[in-house]
Each structure stands twice: as structure tokens, then as C-alpha cells.
Image (cartoon, rainbow, N blue to C red):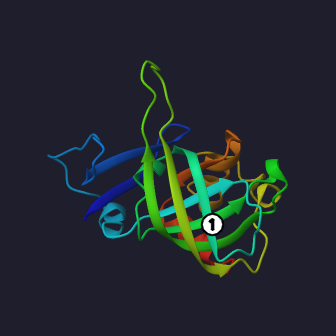
């Protein structure tokens, strides 16, 4: 399955442009354009982050039911890499683990409701525990939304709108997070 995702900075926000997706979901694609270098690098496996309530931060398997998705999070699939953040709003400490998605199931939208955030249920097999702290307090100072830094991308996606969520991330953000393991 080939998937391309390009995350580009727009005017004060992180714009998401999806080039091609082979999924049961209908996703807008741009057939006349070539994928960016970033998108080509993501075609086999994408990287995601989740911020959610975590009852056991040292568990070997995590199950997250009906999680909100933003910034391409609805594209998560089995085999994708994910970085798990225990929500500080729920008493967590931020980054706790990385893992591989072992199952992903889109939640059907409710009939008769016009605007709904896509939701997904996932199961994750932990592959590593974080060795250093990364949470709201470490990311708070990165608030210049146009600076292109991976820290800013994470701060924007997680804490500008503080709801728990699954989100797609750039290769640069994934490389930055890997430095905490």
C-alpha cells in the first residue's frame, strides 16, 4: 500500500496535503502534481503521534478506543510507527513510548451529524520506552508557528488545541522525537 503525506507550513498553520492514498476512505488527491521529497520518503510507512490518557505507561500493548484524529491522523494503519504521549490533562507526563500499530479501525460517522471529527481505534505494540522527558513544559516556548522547527510542529499539533488526538507528523518531527529514546 503506497501512501504519500506532505506536511507543509502555511500561513501560521501546518497545512496537510495528501497526494495519494489507497484506503477504504475517500481522500482528496492531486493527480497532476508530483509528490514532494518529503512525501516520497513517507510512501511505505507514515509516522504518527498520539496524546491520550494512559493508565499503565509501561504496558507492552496499548489500546486506544475512538480517538479523535487531526492533521492526517485518520490515515493511520497497521504497521505505522507511533509515538505515545500520556496526556498531561489526564495526569500523564508527556512522551512515554514508541510503538508499531498492530490494528487500526476507523469509527463510522454518526448519521445526521453534519460536522464530525474522524475517530479511529488502534492497538499499539510498544517497541521502546522514552529515556528523556518531552511534554508541554519542554515544548511551550516553541510558539513561532512559522519557524519550521519540529518542536514547534509538536507544540502546535498537541497543545495549541489541547484535546487528546492522533496526528500525522513530518519526518523531521519523528527524527526529533527519536532522540528521546
For the C terminus, the quadrant is: bottom right
Rendered image quadrant of residue 139? bottom right
Residue holding disc 1: 62
Q: Nearer the viewer, residue 47 or 6?
A: 47
Quarter of the picture containing the N terminus is bottom left
Please state the horizontal and vertical placement of residue 49, each as a whole percent of the image: 58, 60
Query: 79 or 145: nearer the eye?
Result: 79
Decide which of 44, 152 is in the foreground and name it. Answer: 44
Q: Position of residue 101 (x, y in %)?
A: 49, 68
Above or below 79: residue 74: above
The picture places residue 46, in percent across and down from the top left corner, at 41, 65
Residue 69 vertical placement versus 44 (above, below): above
Relative to residue 33, is residue 26 drawn left or right?
right
Q: In the image, residue 93 lies at what x, y percent?
A: 81, 62
* Residue at position x 16%, y 46% in the image: 31
Q: Is residue 76 left or right of residue 28?
A: right
Image quadrant where residue 45 sits: bottom left
Determine if residue 149 is in view: no
Amino acid at each position: 500500500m503506497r501512501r504519500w503525506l506532505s506536511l507543509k507550513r502555511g500561513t501560521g498553520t501546518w497545512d496537510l496535503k495528501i497526494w495519494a492514498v489507497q484506503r477504504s476512505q475517500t481522500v482528496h488527491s492531486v493527480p497532476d502534481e508530483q509528490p514532494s521529497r518529503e512525501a516520497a520518503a513517507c510512501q511505505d510507512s507514515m509516522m504518527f503521534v498520539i496524546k491520550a490518557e494512559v493508565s499503565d505507561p509501561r504496558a507492552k500493548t496499548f489500546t486506544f478506543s475512538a480517538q479523535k484524529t487531526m492533521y492526517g491522523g485518520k490515515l493511520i494503519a497497521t504497521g505505522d510507527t507511533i509515538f505515545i504521549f500520556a496526556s498531561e490533562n489526564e495526569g500523564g507526563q508527556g512522551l512515554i513510548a514508541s510503538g508499531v500499530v498492530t490494528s487500526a479501525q476507523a469509527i463510522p460517522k454518526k448519521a445526521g451529524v453534519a460536522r464530525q471529527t474522524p475517530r479511529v481505534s488502534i492497538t499499539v505494540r510498544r517497541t521502546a520506552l522514552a529515556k528523556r522527558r518531552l511534554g508541554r513544559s519542554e515544548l511551550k516556548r516553541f510558539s513561532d508557528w512559522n519557524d519550521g522547527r519540529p518542536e514547534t510542529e509538536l507544540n502546535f499539533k498537541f497543545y495549541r488545541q489541547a484535546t487528546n488526538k492522533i496526528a500525522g507528523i513530518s519526518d523531521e518531527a519523528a527524527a526529533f522525537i527519536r532522540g528521546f529514546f
